[in-house]
Amino acid sequence: MSNVPELFGSLVFNDTVMKARLPKDIYRALQKTIKEGSHLELDVANVVAASMKDWATELGATHFTHWFQPMTGITAEKHDSFISPQGDGTVIMEFSGKELVRGEPDASSFPSGGLRATFEARGYTAWDPTSYAFIKDGTLCVPTAFCSYTGEALDKKTPLLRSMDAISKQALRILKLFGNTAPKRVLTTVGPEQEYFIIDKDVYLQRPDLIYTGRTLVGARPPKGQELEDHYFGALKPQIAAYMHDLDEELWKLGILSKTKHNEVAPAQHELAPIFSTTNIAADHNQLTMELMRKVADRHGLTCLLHEKPFAGINGSGKHNNWSISTDNGQNLLDPGDTPFENAQFLLFLVAVIKAVNKYQDLLRISVASAGNDHRLGANEAPPAIISIFLGEELGGVLDALADGTPYVGVEHVSMEIGATVLPHFPKDTTDRNRTSPFAFTGNKFEFRALGSSQSIAEPNVVLNTAVADILDEFANQLEASTDFIGDLNRLVKATILENRRIIFNGNGYDDAWVIEAEKRGLSNLKTTPEALVKYLTEQNVDLFVRHGVYTHKEIESRHEIYLENYAKTINIEALTLIDLANQKIIPAVNGYLTELAATVAAVSAFGEPTAQKKLGAKVSALANELYTKLSALETALIDVHGIEDSVDAAFAFRERVFTAMAELRIVVDELELTVGSDWWPLPTYGEILYSVI
Ligand code: ADP
Ligand code: MG
């Protein structure tokens, strides 16, 4: 085992490196930019760039890249070497402040959702100095935001940074009301728990559906799935342990705080959780984590599947977005604290989150909507598509007592008076029992559990930050004008609880009764991506983003277009892959098996009536006919849908016609898989995939 403290961050141009390598005045100027967002002068940038280049080349780097997060959902990089010709046939290694601060990649091949049509194709990347530069595969990577030439965001990071500014601004106003003036900035923090599957690479390479779509489009249930619950927290298999060990080392080198690893519920499923960090850094690190999960797996002869639902009938993968708000001097604003004063401040932030989640529940749902995640949300798997908040009995009881003016039975105090009463102590482990809630309070943070495993954590956090900023803004407006702060605070908290109670639900989120109850409460139940996206451009949502400077009207429209397109393209690729699989692999295999059966029937006739063989042949033949019928139906549906111009209509048609036709075809294929002899079946089965790693 290598020396972890020494290994940790060894490929990162972090604070220690900066302190050691930068002249004092330069270091101070850069710190000011990092901490306060002040403008960085070019002469400072020049010194920083030269120092970064020296450091990187000493570690073997030859290239640099602006590393950014376009709307593809993954990261992008374009490598330039440091070489600079000297005119005498030699080169030196150079990296200028200008190259560090700004890049100009051609934006024309990244999704822009129509922004490109109105603006120039050129885009630029701008250094995000709050996220450290790092070395990956011999290249110095500079984390950046990516915008069009006219400043429109073309990526996931720009709005995330804007949303962090928005919540910081509003939270500081609230803190000031409590006399809390020390913090200069308020940050949101995120710890994303990441689920994934690991399978054998050879098996993976035999499944075109996994290769093209990330999930199995066909496959009958294996005799053993997850019913014995023997995988969760089970001992790690040696190959998996070796993989995780290697992965941890790679992550640590990049300064990623990989902390927890364990087996998940489904066979071949695992989880990695880091220690939380500031949201934009958490987003960068989660992208790197997903990339390294794949890369390191490949090195081990394994394949990492990050799709939300690689296998039907087996648990899918998600991401738990643990989220909190904290001051730059380390005070967690969602920690109840010990004094009436801390409690009062906590309660105000708490009810702000409750109101934000209630008011902007559709946006939260939209922020996790994707073709992949549709297999989980609203499909009887963790968590439901209905957004609700779990507070736990204790905290729920306190809020009830506050709102209704009734005594809280958990403590001696007769009535709960904000600013005067100390909250009861909430034991942390009793707050986290409900695993079915999409949005749960877990002691000193909220856990948004509806994220898909493959998605960037940027969007859900943009929504969370902005929605909460909006309510804090509203609260600050009311309280700043108050002449009776404690009285008005009490009234505001009570009113907010009463008005937003419908979003709080401590019961079982998978229960059918909840769906009915939620409808009665007027909560949204947006089961699929097209249904969710219809709500994206409502006046309330657009106004929210525009008001807080997170998206312009044009930007949000372009995002809507990109999400619709992504959805349609994903289903389209799946349909084409399934059609190919059926034509190229399954039909020939079935025909081969039928030919063999016919020969067997003739051979067996020598001994008597071949009843069994004929029955089997008739069954397979009937299924083959059914297969042709369903396949033609899918092909027809696809042709029809391709004729639809409007992107909203197309998304719905992909869902209602193509997706449905795929599901119907699959039923027949899976039946055939269980009927046709394994020597003839052209694809590794679920059993062979899920138990491929020993
Ligand atoms: P559990 O495993 O029960 O869900 P943990 O306390 O282990 O809960 O935390 C899970 C994740 O939440 C970890 O990634 C952790 O770093 C993160 N987390 C803890 N505190 C915070 C916080 N204040 N802000 C954001 N994330 C946090
Ligand atoms: Mg958790």
Image (cartoon, rainbow, N blue to C red):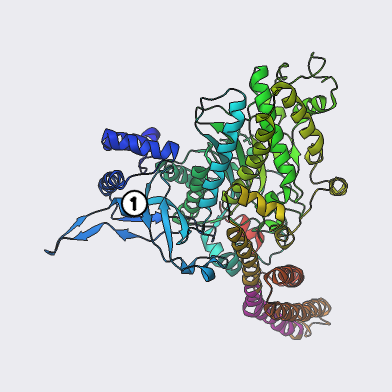
Q: Is residue 224 visible?
A: no
Closer to us: 91 or 595 = 91
The majority secondary structure of the magenta stretch comes to helix
Closer to us: 575 or 240 = 575
Give the vertical position of 658 relative to 103 (above or below).
Answer: below
Q: Residue 204 in magenta?
A: no
Q: Residue 588 in magenta?
A: yes
Q: Position of residue 88 (x, y in %)?
A: 11, 63
Closer to us: 9 or 543 = 543
Q: Quadrant of ligand 2?
A: top right
Within the image, what quadrant is residue 181 found in? top right
**SS at mark 1 in the image:** helix
Residue 95 vs residue 10: left or right? left
Give the vertical position of 485 relative to 257 (above or below).
Answer: above
Within the image, what quadrant is residue 588 found in? bottom right
Give the vertical position of 277 relative to 539 (above or below).
Answer: above
Q: Position of residue 423 (x, y in %)?
A: 72, 20
Q: Position of residue 564 (x, y in %)?
A: 65, 65
Residue most extreme to the top: 412
Disc 1 crowd rating (10 Å Cα; few below 14, some 14-19, many 20+) is many
Query: In which quadrant will I find the N terminus?
Result: top left
Q: Position of residue 633 (x, y in %)?
A: 75, 79
Residue range highlighted in magenta: 576-601
Q: Which residue is mark 1?
A: 100
Residue 114 vs residue 501: left or right? left
Residue 509 vs residue 317: left or right? right
Amino acid under label 1? Leu
Q: Residue at x 54, y 37 (%)?
A: 276
